[in-house]
Image: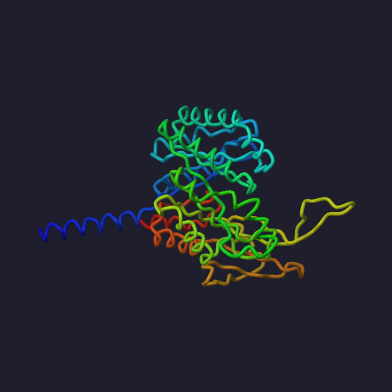
Amino acid sequence: MKVKAIAILLLLVYLSNAYAAHLERLFYLTADIADSSLSKEQLQQIKSHAKSIDILAPQIYQLDENGIIWGYLDPRVLTFSRENKIKIMPLITNSDFNQEKLHQFLQNTGAQERAIVEMVSLCKQYHFYGLQFDFENIHLNDKDAFSHFFQAAADRLHHNGFILSVAIIPHPTEVLNSTYDRWLFENWSGAYDYSLLGQNADFISLMSYDKHTSLTTPGPISASNWVEETIKNLLKVVPAEKISLGIPTYSGYWYTGESGQLIPEKYSYRSKITQISYSKVLSLLNEFQLTLLWQNQWKSSYVMYANHYKNEYLFVEDAKSFRAKLDLARHYQLRGISVWKLGLEDPEIWKVIHPD
């Protein structure tokens, strides 16, 4: 009996370790705006690393205030994914992340029913694994309405054999003691009801990036210490097996740029961030003869330098910083990772994900 008990215990330990070792790997991709199809580079990335991808999540569908969904999925992705047993789970976003249009939609039960019917139809037509909601710029006042719509959509998709996940912006973990933090909570992050979404979603993709934006001072895209706080905050109400950690592959480039908002007869200029690929990072490092500095608390690299006597900043997400966040997902035994996005990454991340 003791031998049998020890054998069972060892099996449980093995299964636990196996679960922790393999994280479900979701990769986002976006279509080329010009022709609504994937670029050759994006398609080649999928082909080259198929064994490291469990789910492809193309950001292709948009939903308007009337519940109409539109978008285009490159048929090559469907064919290749089926041949390589990669699941397809497209994103549905609220059109242009327009807050007022989303509010109108959430007040219109007929529009919501139209949208849910179309979601089920798309899943059946293309044999999707399911869908992911990427609804952003939701006002705090629409929190309950959004949760109700998500539950209704989840119930219908589950009934038809499909899954539904949701991407969420982390709530601030600090006290809302600044105008910016309050604005962010009221208009972007506060409308996600962690508990209700966790109950109805098959999993949640936690977008633990963009901590610093053009509206803040320059800083890391996804500092490891902050990412860990967002994980622990979500774990209070959502089980680990329902959490997929969002990991960025893009880096932040801060410079002096146009705000895009016209002031009479002149433009407004301010500090601005652009998301850049790792290849662009290498190009800038070479152009200005820069050496990155590693910040151990953030688990990421950065450099500040002068360009025509004006300071510019690079906050870099590379394979080393990717590994740090992957280690957090493993440490907290999360369901997996949600990587934004294919085509921007340091090529070395593939060795981190799939060492063999």
- For the residue pair 172 and 237, the one nearer the viewer reads as 237
In x, y percent, where is residue 283?
62, 60
Q: Residue at x 56, y 62 (%)?
A: 173
In x, y percent, where is residue 3?
11, 60
Q: Quadrant of the C terminus?
A: bottom left
- For the residue pair 145 and 270, the one nearer the viewer reads as 145
The quadrant holding residue 36 is top right
In x, y percent, where is residue 327?
42, 62
Q: Residue at x 47, y 44 (%)?
A: 46
In the image, farthest residue toward the left:
1
On the rendered structure, is 210 left or right of 155? right
In x, y percent, where is residue 118?
54, 28
Q: Quadrant of the N terminus?
A: bottom left
Using the image, determine if residue 22 lies above or below residue 157: below
Q: Residue at x 39, y 39 (%)?
A: 84
Q: Residue at x 59, y 71 (%)?
A: 291
